[in-house]
Image: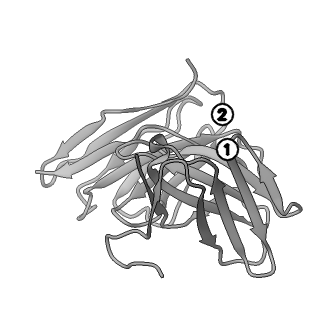
Amino acid sequence: DGGITQSPKYLFRKEGQNVTLSCEQNLNHDAMYWYRQDPGQGLRLIYYSQIVNDFQKGDIAEGYSVSREKKESFPLTVTSAQKNPTAFYLCASSLGLGGPDIQYFGAGTRLSVL
Amino acid sequence: GESVGLHLPTLSVQEGDNSIINCAYSNSASDYFIWYKQESGKGPQFIIDIRSNMDKRQGQRVTVLLNKTVKHLSLQIAATQPGDSAVYFCAEFRGGSYIPTFGRGTSLIVHP
């Protein structure tokens, strides 16, 4: 069953703690993305990666970090520097043809602060 | 008009009606558009796309219309069903960029 898997579905962070959100895809896509979704707002881009071992900051990268060591995986770490982390986080992937393309999304991780 | 803050624009329809959801995009250089459906607590699902060299594209029960003159995109859903209840939002790609800009979305509520 092909797709994008995000885990966990729910995550709680204590103050000062770093937490990592997992994103795995078996679509053989080159490009992967992380978005943050707040109530009533559009998706905002955190980080994106077009190819293994390379990634770029999006519009709201401060307080977040990523890695892309494998084509299938693009984990997102929410660091203690992110002062307002409560949100719904969405991972997406696309073929990565270098032009506009359909992005396919995971089911999301809802992060809350304890 | 659009609401502000936490409240999305909302469209309420009766089951069986046709629904029209609108999206105004910002950049005249945008050349590719996608409509997504997002059910509560889930990730967005691709519905239909359209390139700027087209005015209309049809899918199963859905039609997307593109008016480049006024930078307006619409999604028409025929014979709306309760399962169509969700937030619908458009994404625009500017001039060949592979990074989209997403709209805030419209909440569609279908009453049985």
Q: Which mark is residue A29?
A: 2
Residue type for callout 1: Arg
Q: Is residue B31 visible?
A: no
Task: Answer above or below: position of B74 versus A33.
Answer: below
Q: Is residue A67 visible?
A: yes
Q: Are marks 1 and 2 in contact (CB under 8 Å)?
A: no
**Other residues around mark 2 within 10 Å, as few (<14) / some (14–19) / many (≥20):** some
Residue pictured at 59% horizontal, 31% vertical: A71
Residue type for callout 2: His
| Residue at the extreme top | A1
User: Where does the image place residue A103, in percent across and percent down from the top left?
Assistant: 62, 45
The N terminus of chain A lies in which quarter of the figure? top right
Q: How many marks?
A: 2
| Residue at the extreme right | B53
Task: Give residue B91's quadrant in the image.
Answer: bottom right
Q: Which mark is residue B61?
A: 1
